Amino acid sequence: MEKKIGIIHYNIPGSLEEFLRYASETGYGYVELQISDVWGQGVENPEAEAEKVAKLVESHGLKVSALSAGNDFVLLDEEEIKRQVERMRRICGLAKILGTNVIRTEGGRPKESVPQERWAEAIAGCLKRCLDFAEEMDIYFALDNHGLVTNDAELQVRIFEMVGSKRVGANLDTMNYRWFGHDLETVKRFYEIIAPYTLHTHMKDGRGSRGEYKGEALGEGEIDLLYAVKCLKEAGYDGVWCAEYEGREDPRVGYRKCYEWLVKHV
């Protein structure tokens, strides 16, 4: 069975087409695209842009594994929620044009208007409002353990239980729990907790937390990636293994190393 190995369009120089050429020539079969790739500043017809990008991706022999939404669901204000939900509806339509049914969603940013004890409620409430059109379009939301809100597997699972739909699961970033400040044993425990809910991955390595963080190519940092792979496989994960690199080398070198690690270990 062909391995599903992907690369995120992030932290790599050049145009989208140059990125796609690099991904294909390196051996990657899938790409995760950012919403800015199809709905950037000043783009008035993102659907037409998505159609162009879809053809470009296909011309390089690639498939889109996920579309990153760049959303903020840490909201309790009704008007703000409506705006974000309507934006997400349109993003789901763009994902379908691109040929994927996975949206990588953010939790959102901490803010004074939403106390920490209501973060889960806020995020779950927004996701619930997206379920009708997700069902219509056959879309899945992969909530990332990213930033300062959702970098906790127990909080993520609480959100999933509050939403109560197979349409909502996780994007597992193997480094981010550690980046947030969790110790390495807690990170491994979080892999066990989140693996059964995982819809998409960011395979990423590094060392340290917050200001001490240093990115590394896969297998060169302190993260127990083999344990993450074991947890995911035992949970039945059959999605894309998507590389993300934040190290100090030329990203084209770093992402090539990541590809070689993934070919060998997943």
Image (cartoon, grey):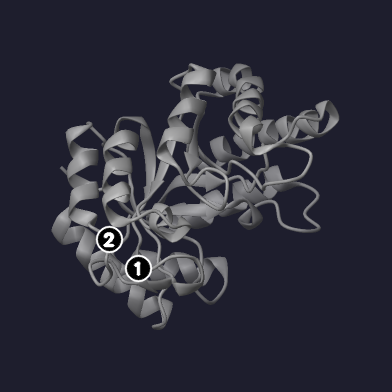
Out of 1 and 75, give the one closest to the viewer.
75
**Mark 2 lies on residue:** 223
Q: Which image quadrant is residue 250 in?
A: bottom left
Q: Residues within 10 Å of mark 1 (few under 14, many from 20)?
A: many
Identify the residue shown where x is 21% and y is 40%.
231
Q: Is residue 43 left or right of residue 233?
A: right
Residue 101 at x, y percent in the picture: 48, 34
Q: Which mark is residue 206?
A: 1
Callout 1 touching callout 2 (CB < 8 Å): yes
Near-viewer residue (63 or 203): 203
For this view, does 44 lie left or right of residue 156? right
Mark before the other along the chain sequence, 1 or 2: 1
Between residue 243 and residue 215, name the one nearer to us: 215
Query: Is residue 3 something one can see in this rendering?
Result: no
Q: Is residue 254 visible?
A: yes
Compared to 23, does 167 lie above or below?
Answer: above
Residue type (three-letter) at the residue carrying disc 2: Ile
Q: Residue furthest right?
A: 79
Secondary element under disc 1, as helix, strand or loop, is strand
Q: In the picture, which quadrant includes the N terminus?
A: top left
Q: Position of residue 263 (x, y in %)?
A: 19, 59
Q: Looking at the rendering, which quadrant does residue 80 occupy? A: top right
